[in-house]
Amino acid sequence: MGQYTQYTNSGRVAFGENGVLSVLSPVWVWRVSLGAEAPEGAGDVCALDAEERRRYEAFRFEADRRRFLLSHLALRRILGGGVRFERDPRGKPRLQGGELRFNLSHSGSLALVAVSRDCEVGVDVEQVRRNVKVELVARRFFAPGEMATLQGLSEPARTEAFFRCWVRKEAYLKAAGTGLTDALREIDAGQMPGWSIADLEVPPGYVAAVAAPRPQLAVRLCDWRGEAFSPF
C-alpha cells in the first residue's frame, strides 16, 4: 500500500487514508528503482515507440540506455501495457484516446511516474550533485525571491535547496506543458495561484516534486513492484 498525503499550494496540510482525502481524486506517484534491484517490466526495447527508440539509441553509454528503457517500460506497464502515445503541439506525450494524464522523470537510479485521472500533472526528480555551480545557474534561471532564499543559506543546505527549487519549477512546467524553453526566471514555484507544487519523499541523495493545477492535491506515493495502475 502507498501513503496518502494532502497538499495545498502552501504545502502539506494532512496525512492519512480517511477523512478529507477520500473526497479528492489523488495523483498517484510511483517510485521506480533503476538499479540492480529494479523489478522486471514486461517487454523490451521493441515495446517502445519510434520516438522512444530514437531517444534510447541516442544514449552513448549502455547504463544510460538501460535506465531509460527501464523507466519507459515501467511507465507503459503502469498505464496498462499496450498503450499508444501521441504528442501535443509542444511535444508532450499523451495517451491516444485515453483520459489518464501522466508524466515521467528519471535521474540516476530513480524514476518517478505520476498519473492523474482528471488534471494535468508534472513530476521531476534530480540526483543532488555537489559539483554544480548553483549560484551561477540560479542567477540565470531563478526568480528574485527564489534567489534571495538561496543566498541566505550556506553549504551544504544551499545545494540541496537549489535542487529542490529546480524540481519544483520543472514539475510545474511539465504539468503546464510549456517546457523548459520558457522564461524560468519569471516563474516562482512558491507563488503560483491555483496550483499545488509539493515535495515528494524519495531516497537520500535525491529530491523530487509533483505539480498539478489544483488549489489542493492528494498524493498517493508508493514503490513500484511491477503492477499496473488501479485507481481503487
Image: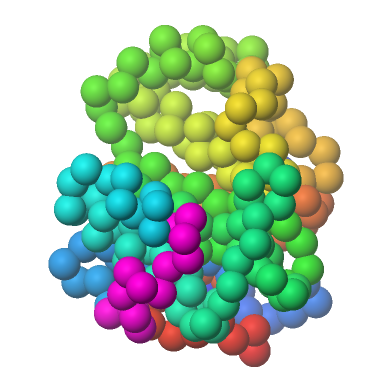
Residue at left 24%, top 23%?
131
The image shows residue 153 at horizontal and vertical percentages of 43, 18
Residue at left 24%, top 60%?
66
Q: Nearer the viewer, residue 114 or 82?
A: 82
Q: Nearer the viewer, residue 16 or 70?
A: 70
Quadrant holding the C terminus? bottom right
Magenta segment range? 40-52
Q: Is residue 106 visible?
A: no
Q: Is residue 51 visible?
A: yes
Q: Nearer the viewer, residue 78 or 224?
A: 78
- Residue at the farthest bottom position: 232
Q: Is residue 142 left or right of residue 213?
A: left
Residue at left 51%, top 39%?
167
Residue at left 61%, top 27%?
181
The image shows residue 14 at horizontal and vertical percentages of 66, 63
The image shows residue 54 at horizontal and vertical percentages of 40, 52
The image shows residue 55 at horizontal and vertical percentages of 39, 50
Q: Is residue 70 left or right of residue 180?
A: left
Q: How many marks?
A: 0
Q: Quadrant of residue 72?
A: bottom left
Q: Quadrant of residue 135?
A: top left
Q: Nearer the viewer, residue 94 or 74?
A: 94
Asked if 7 appears above or below 47 in the picture, the reply is: above
Scheme of colours in the image: rainbow
Q: Is residue 9 left or right of residue 133?
A: right
- Tell me if residue 44 is in the magenta stretch: yes
- Tell me if residue 219 is in the magenta stretch: no
